[in-house]
Image (cartoon, rainbow, N blue to C red):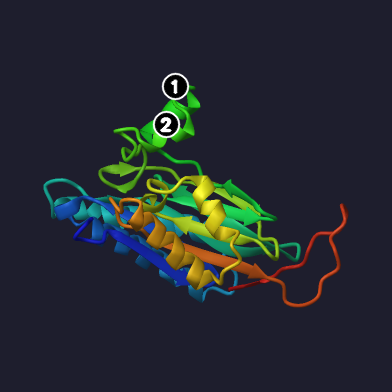
Amino acid sequence: MRTVNEDSSLVAPPVFLVADGMGGYARGDVASRLVVESFASLATLREVQPADVEAAIATAQTRVASLAAEFSSAPGSTLVSAAYVLEDGRGYWLLANIGDSRAYCYTDGRLEQISKDHSVVQELIDAGHLTRDEAMGHPERHVITRAIGALTRSEADFALVPAEPGSRLLLCSDGLTSELSDTAILHILSAGMAPDHTVQTLVDAAVAAGGHDNVTVVLVDVVADGPTAPASENTAPGPGRLR
C-alpha cells in the first residue's frame, strides 16, 4: 500500500542486513540506504570482527543524523545485521539490531526470534500487559524506542548465534512480521523450498495479508561443505557455507 519503498537491504557475504527507513517525505529511504552503505565495506574484509560492526553502526549513526539539517523532521532507520564469523573453527552469526526489524533462526523445525524489538509494544509485552498475539493488532505497534538517526544515538543489541549447517537465518523488516505471525512464517520456512522461492512466498503472503508497509526479507541457508559426522555433546559441527 506504500508508494515509496523506505526499506533497504544488503546481501554481500559474509554480511547481510535489512534497514527500514522512517520519515516519509523526510527521506526515510535515504536513511536506510545510508545504513546499507555504511556496512558495505565489511564485505571486503577477510574476517569481520565485532569492532568492525560497531564502527559501521557508528558511521551509520553519524551519516543519518546529519540528514536532520536538511529536513524539518529528522529521518531515521532500523537496523538488523548478521555477519558470518569463525570462532575456534566453528561458524557463528554475529547479530546486531536497533529498532523492530528482526532476525530469526530456523533449525530442526523450530523458529526462534533472535533479536528483541525496541518498541512500545515489546515493553508492554515485557511488563505483562500484552500478549504477542495482541501486540500484532495494537495501534502503537509501529512506535519504536530506538533508531539510527532521528535525533537519537541508540545503542545496538548484539548476539552470537551458532550458524549450524542445515539452519536458515531470516532477516526482515516489520512489514513482514506486522502481517504474518511466527506460526505462519514457520510454516513457509519449513516447506523445503529454495531460498529465493521461500523469500518470494513470504513477501507475497505479507502483501496478501494487507501489505500495509514495505516488506523486505533476506534469507540465508547454511549448507555443509560435505559429509559431516553427527555432532556429539563434545564435538561441534564444522563451519558451513552460505546460500
Distance Cα–Cα, label 1 vs label 2: 10 Å
Q: Is residue 156 above or below residue 227?
A: above
Left or right relative to 84: residue 38:
left
Q: Of callouts 1 and 2, which one flags the residue occurring earlier in the amino acid sequence?
A: 1
- Given residues 135 and 40, the one toward you in this image is 135
Residue bearing the label numbered 1: 129
Give the secondary structure at mark 1. loop
Q: Provide residue 216's location: percent of width, then percent of height.
A: 38, 60
The residue under the point 25% across, 43% down is 151
The residue under the point 56% across, 72% down is 194
The residue under the point 46% across, 70% down is 11
Give the secondary structure at mark 2. helix
Q: Provide residue 29's location: percent of width, then percent of height.
A: 25, 60
**One can see residue 161 in this view:** yes
Residue bearing the label numbered 2: 134
Q: Provide residue 87's location: percent of width, then percent of height.
A: 71, 61
**One can see residue 16 in this view:** no
Going by the numbered disc 1, the residue's amino acid type is His
Quadrant in the picture for the C terminus: bottom right
For mark 2, does the 10 Å Cα neighbourhood hold few (<14), some (14 to 19), or many (20 or more) residues? few
